[in-house]
Image (cartoon, rainbow, N blue to C red):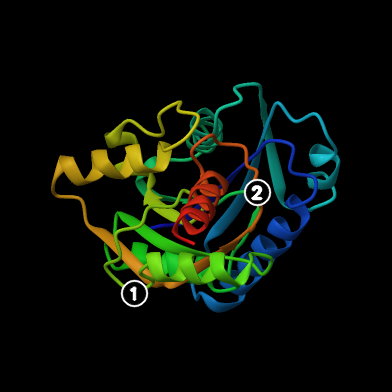
Amino acid sequence: MIDSIVVVVPAKDEQDEISDCLQSLMAARDLLINTVARQVSIRIIVVLDDCRDGTAGLVAQFPYVETVTCWHCSVGAARRAGVDYAISTHSARSLWIASTDADCQVPADWLVQMLQYADAGTELVLGTVLPRPGLPEALMQAWLSAHDSSDDHRHVHGANLGIHARTYVELGGWSALVSDEDVDLVTRAERSGGILIQRSGGMTVTTSSRRFGRAPRGFAGYLIELEQAIGEAG
């Protein structure tokens, strides 16, 4: 049975977004503590990956938030560093790993849902994301048309992913990729066979609508491609 949840948040120069992200995580932490009958420890780890702005100072203002510092300039390597740190101090047999991004905000019941999936035997859960207000109307409509937000969707987002630590270790963990590290991990899980994967449409994380990002082929890059496609179609 899961007795600990660790949330790993990679951050590369995210001073404009990290405070809102951590406020949402603290709300999710509080709801879990006040909702679940048994004792479950919750750790929030921000991985400061070659940050050269004020991100570290803002993170330091939040209680209960730990930091790992690295200079990988790679979202996959940063996620891996955070998980390695967590696993080094806790048994993988009873640990659940929750993954999001520094420019995202999780719903208040995010960790409650994660734990419910884990308790039901799920080994990997994949949620959905929704851009926050700020996109041009045409681009938002194009995004909504291209994305299935129901259960059994086929999307993969490192910003909204949970995995049992035992399963994570068996799969070899996050690869040190600068983008698509989430697709890589899920592909290995699907190919391995026997892993219970839940694709949840009811667990939605909101993400920045910016069109400049940290990962070359990340969410911001996808929005740029979608915007270009709209322009070409028009």
Mark 1 to mark 2 CA distance (whole Å): 25 Å
Is residue 223 something one can see in this rendering?
yes
138 or 19, which lies in front? 138
Of helix, strand and loop, which one carries label 2? loop
The mark tally for this picture is 2
x and y, in percent, of residue 143 in the image = 47, 65
x and y, in percent, of residue 122 in the image = 29, 60
Residue 78 lies left or right of residue 155; in this view the side is right
Q: Which mark is residue 102?
A: 2
Of the numbered discs 1 and 2, the one sitting upstream in the chain is: 2
Q: Quadrant of residue 69?
A: top right
User: Which class describes the residues within 10 Å of circle 1: few (<14), some (14-19), or many (20+)?
Assistant: some
What's under tag 2, amino acid-wise? Ala
Up/down of 95 relative to 143, above or below = above
Up/down of 46 relative to 80, above or below = below
Q: Residue at x 47, y 36 (%)?
A: 87
Q: Residue at x 39, y 65 (%)?
A: 146
Question: Which residue is tagged 1?
Answer: 150
x and y, in percent, of residue 210 in the image = 66, 53
Q: Residue at x 50, y 29 (%)?
A: 178
Q: Residue at x 47, y 35 (%)?
A: 179
What's under tag 1, amino acid-wise? Ser
Is residue 99 something one can see in this rendering?
no
Q: Which one is closest to the eye, mark 1 or mark 2?
A: 1
Of helix, strand and loop, which one carries label 1? loop
x and y, in percent, of residue 152 in the image = 26, 67
Residue 53 lies left or right of residue 123; in this view the side is right
Quadrant of the frame with the N terminus? bottom left
Residue 4 lies left or right of residue 131; in this view the side is left
